[in-house]
């Protein structure tokens, strides 16, 4: 039985879907105003793992992961410039150009990480009408008020009828002392009230008509609206990073309870953060590394490029609820671990079956299943697979044998857990970059041999290499120091 940690109850609970055989799952996606970084990879991979495992268990999963393309202001939900609009202003682009550009790049990076696309990927800007209707419902129930064209959640009133702060374990006093005084405060009754709808300032370029003003929805509103639109008024799982618990997910609970009279989410799941040398990642710390920089090795904190599968393996080596501290050394260690798995898998595929099994392979599937059922304990799954490499190597070295049935089972466990559930691409060592490197190396090697042949006046060999490479479409140029080639 799958046991998952519910951030709301703070216990591990046996997962039981609301509708037999079906799972509805909503995960907060990216705000698309910049390239995805390591901090985006962790929730994407964590909930991809859950999606893959639920699917493996036989559930029909509807996985909704949104794109935030409006309403995410610089200072959390309520104040500052819209992040997308700011980027658009700085780059002199239409905001939707910014959205499309970074959405495309996000998809590219996620595909590289072998993160499966969600079933539905709704955009906040495509659901303005639904968000306005949701705000109206909260106003009708008396838990919000209009002030100067903006609509705010009346948190004090709400907290009298519902337990506000139950997800984050905060009470209103904690929140008051945490809340920064920002401009626009005078519109609110209390500093902890949050915007459901904001009237657009004249310079604000993204705005829509509403009953209250020409404006835009508050950031939290999109997830309440799109979650219930696509998954129903009650659904199974809502996920995201720990940093979203407050205010974002707390606000979502309040909005949904205020509008519908009950909570919508059955299990809240949160992945922990990635730190860099113990520090939270962020542009202000100058330790912000995009996935593209990882793949290309273009950052002062990186010793070399790291392929997407190394990043995926690095993240899965830790349990999703523990912190992960990034360093170039930690990634190099992950790269070695991944290589060991790739080598073991390649050997496993080539093993020959014998008459009987003399190596230890029993119980592997059960170990992996128990680890996954225990709140997605990926480090244990990886450890179990590593343990089985001993048996693979023993048979490979001719020091033991494995029967046909056991070999089939062993291959099946690796395929299911390493490839289908952990989502590791074990067959493509090094991925595309690795292939490119190997290809370039091979051509350089051939032309090196030709150069040597020329120096030895072995014209037969040197002409043969040149002519045959040319016939294959290569252009070879002899230079002072050696050669250059292109295709
Ligand atoms: Zn969200």
Image: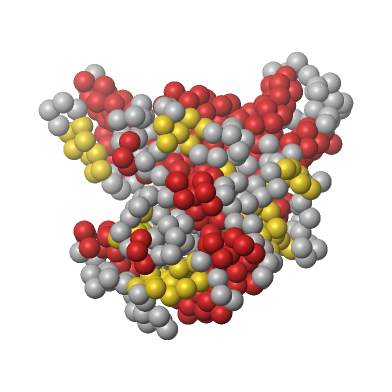
Q: Position of residue 248 (x, y in %)?
A: 50, 56
**Tag count in the figure?**
0
What scheme was used to colour the molecule?
Answer: secondary structure
Q: Quadrant of residue 291?
A: top left
Q: Would you say 235 lies left or right of 217 here?
A: right
Foreground: 464 or 377? 377
Instruction: Give above or below for 193 relative to 473.
Output: below
Extreme-left residue of the structure:
480
Foreground: 403 or 196? 196
**Residue at the image position 38 percent from the left and 50 percent from the top:** 180
Residue 195 visible in this rendered orientation of the protein:
yes
Q: Quadrant of residue 163?
A: bottom right
Instruction: Give above or below for 257 relative to 402.
Output: below
**Residue at the image position 72 percent from the left and 43 percent from the top:** 11
Q: Quadrant of residue 293?
A: top left
Extreme-right residue of the structure:
356
Q: Position of residue 207 (x, y in %)?
A: 34, 75
**Residue at the image position 41 percent from the left and 31 percent from the top:** 279
Q: Would you say 122 lies left or right of 181 here?
A: right
Residue 45 visible in this rendered orientation of the protein:
no
**Residue at the image position 70 percent from the left and 48 percent from the top:** 9
Q: Position of residue 354 (x, y in %)?
A: 82, 27
Instruction: Give above or below for 480 relative to 399.
Output: below
Q: Position of residue 342 (x, y in %)?
A: 58, 32
């Amino acid at each position: 039985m799958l046991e998952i940690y519910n951030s709301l109850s703070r216990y591990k609970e046996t997962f039981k879907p609301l509708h037999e055989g079906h799972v509805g799952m909503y995960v907060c996606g990216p705000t698309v105003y910049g390239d995805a970084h390591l901090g985006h990879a962790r929730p994407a991979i964590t909930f991809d793992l859950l999606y893959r495992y639920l699917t493996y268990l036989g559930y029909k999963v509807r996985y909704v992961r949104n794109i935030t393309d409006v309403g995410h202001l610089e200072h959390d939900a309520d104040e500052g410039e819209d992040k997308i609009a700011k980027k658009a202003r700085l780059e002199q682009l239409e905001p939707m150009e910014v959205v499309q550009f970074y959405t495309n790049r996000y998809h590219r990076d996620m595909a590289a990480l072998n993160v499966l696309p969600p079933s539905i990927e709704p955009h906040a800007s495509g659901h303005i009408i639904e968000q306005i209707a949701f705000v109206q419902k909260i106003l009708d129930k008396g838990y919000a008020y209009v002030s100067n064209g903006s609509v705010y959640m009346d948190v004090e009133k709400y907290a009298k009828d519902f337990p506000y702060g139950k997800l984050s374990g905060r009470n209103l006093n904690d929140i008051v002392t945490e809340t920064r005084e920002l401009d626009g405060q005078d519109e609110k009754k209390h500093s902890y009230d949050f915007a459901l709808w904001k009237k657009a300032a004249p310079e604000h370029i993204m705005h829509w008509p509403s009953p209250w003003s020409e404006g835009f929805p508050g950031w939290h509103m999109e997830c309440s609206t799109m979650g219930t639109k696509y998954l129903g008024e009650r659904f199974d799982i809502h996920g995201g990073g720990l940093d979203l618990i407050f205010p974002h997910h707390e606000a979502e609970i309040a909005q949904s309870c205020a509008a519908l009279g009950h909570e919508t989410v059955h299990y809240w799941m949160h992945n922990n953060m990635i730190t860099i040398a113990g520090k939270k990642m962020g542009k202000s710390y100058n330790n912000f590394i995009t996935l593209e920089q990882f793949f290309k090795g273009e950052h002062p904190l990186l010793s070399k490029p790291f392929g997407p599968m190394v990043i995926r393996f690095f993240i899965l080596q830790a349990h999703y609820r523990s912190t992960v501290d990034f360093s170039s050394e930690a990634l190099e260690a992950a790269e070695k671990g991944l290589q060991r798995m790739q080598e073991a898998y390649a050997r496993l595929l080539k093993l020959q079956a014998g008459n009987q099994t003399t190596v230890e392979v029993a119980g592997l599937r059960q170990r992996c299943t128990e680890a996954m059922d225990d709140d997605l304990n990926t480090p244990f799954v990886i450890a179990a697979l590593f343990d089985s490499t001993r048996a693979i190597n023993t048979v490979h070295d001719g020091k033991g044998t494995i029967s046909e049935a056991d070999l089939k089972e062993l291959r099946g466990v690796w395929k299911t857990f390493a490839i289908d559930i952990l989502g590791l691409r074990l067959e493509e060592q090094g991925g595309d970059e690795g292939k490119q490197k190997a290809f370039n190396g091979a051509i350089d090697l051939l032309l090196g041999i030709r150069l040597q042949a020329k120096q030895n006046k072995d014209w037969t060999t040197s002409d043969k290499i040149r002519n045959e490479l040319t016939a294959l479409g290569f252009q070879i140029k002899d230079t002072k120091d050696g050669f250059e080639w292109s295709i």
